[in-house]
Image (spheres, grey):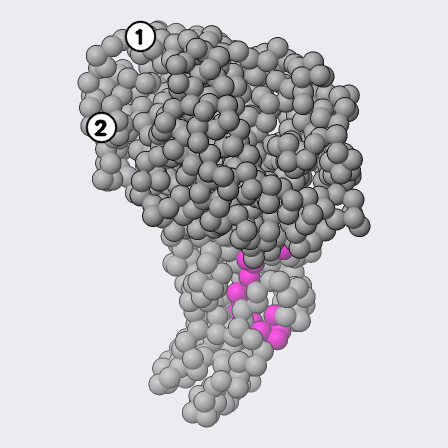
Amino acid sequence: MSAQDLPIELRRALSAVAQTPRLLVASDYDGTMAPIVADPEKAYPRAESVRALRSLASLASTTAAVISGRALKDLAALSRLPAEVQLVGSHGSEFDIGFVHAIDADAKKLLGEINTELTRIASRTAGATVEKKPASIALHVRNSPEDDAEKALIAVRTESALWPGVQVTEGKFVVELAVIATDKGQALDLIRHQDGATAAVFIGDDVTDEKAFARLSGPDIGVKVGPGDTLATYRVDSTEDVAAALAFLLDERRTWLSGADAPPIERLSMLASPRTVALVTPDATLTWLCHPEPDSAAVFAHLLGGTAAGHFSVGPRRTALPLSQKYLDGTMTVQTRWASLSVTDYLPHDVQQGRTDFTRIISGRADAVVSFAPRPEFGQAQVTLEVVDDGIRVLGTNEPYVLRSPGVQWNIATDGNQQTAHAIVEPSKGDVILELRCGTTDMDPSPAPEADRRARSESYWSDWAKTLDLPKLKPDLMKRSALTLRGLVHADSGSIMAAATTSLPEEIGGVRNWDYRYCWLRDAALTATALVSVGSTHEAEEYLDWVHRVLETLPGPERLHPLYTLNGTSLPPEAVIDSLPGYAGSRPVRVGNAANQQVQLDVFGPIVELIVHLADAREKAGAAEPLSDRDWELVGAMVEAVQRRWFEPDHGIWEIRDNPRHHVYSKVMGWVTVDRAVKLADRFGRTALPEWAELRDEIADEVRHKGWKDDVQSYTAAYDGVDLDAATLHIGLSGLIDPEDPRFAATVVATEAELRSGSTVYRYHHDDGLPGIEGGFHLCAAWLVEAYLLIGQRLQAEALFDQLVAAAGPTGLLAEEYDPVAERSLGNHPQAYSHLGLLRCAQLLDLPAQLLA
């Protein structure tokens, strides 16, 4: 018996339930795990079912159980299932072998009387047997002549079954009398509650299993074995079918948990407008979109929860793989193409604040299937879809949503909980235009034709890209990196996102899943600096204004948090969306980021470094005042913050959730803050306080002395250990020590030996207090490229740069991290750090060797 012989509806249901966050798989024993046999003591389970159930129990976020009418000790002896599989005997009344000791004296007395009565009935019934259990007695008449069996059962029903305190359970050829309540449904619910299961599968064949089937609801699946009336939704014929179903469920669950069905992170493409971002999969599924802000709750969270979490998909009616997906050159418009069909997606720009629009255009000769399944609040809000003239209204939430789709005939389907709209469209009769509008009830045609709206959106990006001074190396990829960085800019506020997503894992199936949809002072300053370096200063100006507004809310600059919401407010407490299974089963899914409460003393340096680059750009452009009074005021505030706190331990650039340390990188950035301030004062005739130069030298002397460790021949992560950290390379990259200093070259060699693995570089390898591992960081690889160049190892720099380029996805995007063994991207996507690092490497490799210093 193979899985392909199972009913297709059952296979589809099992495939769907395999993707639930926490799965409970439970089964009866006799007639399901084991065939029905004449001798109950020889009812051995099918080996295939045992293997499947054992393997299911070993998977993450998966519980397996057998709930049987047999006594627990007999069930354990016969099934020989491992401890990982929960065994429940006596129709749900026995959860451990010592249960009998919990029965009081009256119940024990009643149990003895039941045993006497059923033994008496069995003695006069050929083939009948009595089974004693800790809390019940069962009369089996399977091997009795039909008339005798019926007489025996009637005798029980009309006599002892009616005694006070007796609980009756009838099955096939068996009646069981218990002295406590016994219910397989209660047992199923208890296990579900204990393990927090979000869906359950129960398989049974007997009348007693109906109590379990009655408890199933929502995404749960009930499977009845054999004939007879049942509350189960699905049915199979035999125990061989049960084995096949369990094996199929195992494969589906294992595949999903491993991430094999999840779209590779690097193959996701980002759409952007000045206000928001969205992600589409390689097959044109809108997999991620938040509203009203990019750091708000998701309307479509398919990326973290599959179809149940919300999606908007298009594909050919005749199933086929896409031929390509690409950006239209110089824009944030994405086109996905199949033979005779294409889908063009973009985010319109001509919408008012508080509204998010998404437009897709379906073109070609082939019919297309469209599915529209909005799931606001990360799928936690239940919505109703109302088909109206020219589209669909989404009802049931405080925020209005509409889908304008003139001429499209929609079908509304429900899974018992949420609704999804389906349609078949014929683009051969003319382009089909679908306009999702979040934050409005307006279903009217847009004032401007769609072609004009699209042209306006695309020119915003392409006109800007034409002004850039990009590196000559890999020019198309560099343009895409610059566009990606600008796509992460939140124009309404001036802030800049670290990445477009939350909770994409640093390890598949792991817990290192963070929310990066906020504005980190450090990340945003580095992104703005990268944009200044290619000739765009507006983003830096707006970001520095945002920093000023944040500072106005604080008692002093030293109280800056490491990150804020895009609108400059403090983050809400970090929380978990437990209803989402996570990307490839990687849980928890987090919103918010507890790092905003950490002490990170490196954040001041990148802000002052940005002001230096901005002043350079203004000077080259002939500005009358390259360093404005407002920017100099901000420089002074950053130096003041360093003066007050540089000597404290902190959590560092990597936001380690462990005790603070004296991180070398943080001290170096404190030095950068003061060093650049002194140089700006000298260069532009500003007044630096006398103690600034003294502070600069004090920090430098301490770092040189305490950061170096002779026994590892390297500057280390922190003063108090010998562990290495790629960020420590900044001791030379920043100029705190001369790149020609032998100690810097030694640090580069040590970093390569300890932290580089093939095509990537890890942040560190020491225990950071969190379980699991992570991938290598693209930004760390970029730092090592720069370090190689500074110590004269150009060939190594070029080779590592080529490997960094090769990690980019087909549309040119980079996530945060890379797994060099599995050769796949990890972490949030696209990541500003990765793209600014890539740009920096290309710029440096463009320079003659003598200009690198």
In the image, is 185 to the left or to the right of 353? right
The span picked out in magenta is 58-75
Q: What residue is shown with label 1? A: 452
Relative to 403, residue 762 above or below: below
Q: Position of residue 406 (x, y in %)?
A: 26, 16
Q: Which of these two is toward me, 93 or 671?
A: 671
Q: Quadrant of the N terminus?
A: top right
The secondary element bearing badge 1 is classed as: helix
Residue that appears at 45% across and 11% down? 621
Residue 716, magenta (yes or no): no
Specify which label sits upstream in the sequence, 2 or 1: 2
Relative to 701, residue 32 above or below: below
Residue that appears at 58% across and 16% down? 477
Q: Position of residue 751 (x, y in %)?
A: 73, 39
Answer few, some or many: residues within 10 Å of disc 1's Cα (few below 14, many 20 plus, some between 14 and 19).
few
Q: Which of these two is toward me, 536 or 259?
A: 536
Relative to 853, residue 63 above or below: below
- Can residue 673 be seen from the camera position used here? yes
Give the numbered dot on residue 440: 2
In the image, is 760 to the left or to the right of 808? right
Q: Which of these two is toward me, 677 or 838?
A: 677
Q: Quadrant of the C terminus?
A: top right
Residue type for callout 1: Asp
Give the numbered dot on residue 775: none
Residue 74, magenta (yes or no): yes
Answer with the quarter of the image where residue 62 lies. bottom right
State if disc 1 and disc 2 touch (CB < 8 Å). Answer: no
Residue type for callout 2: Thr
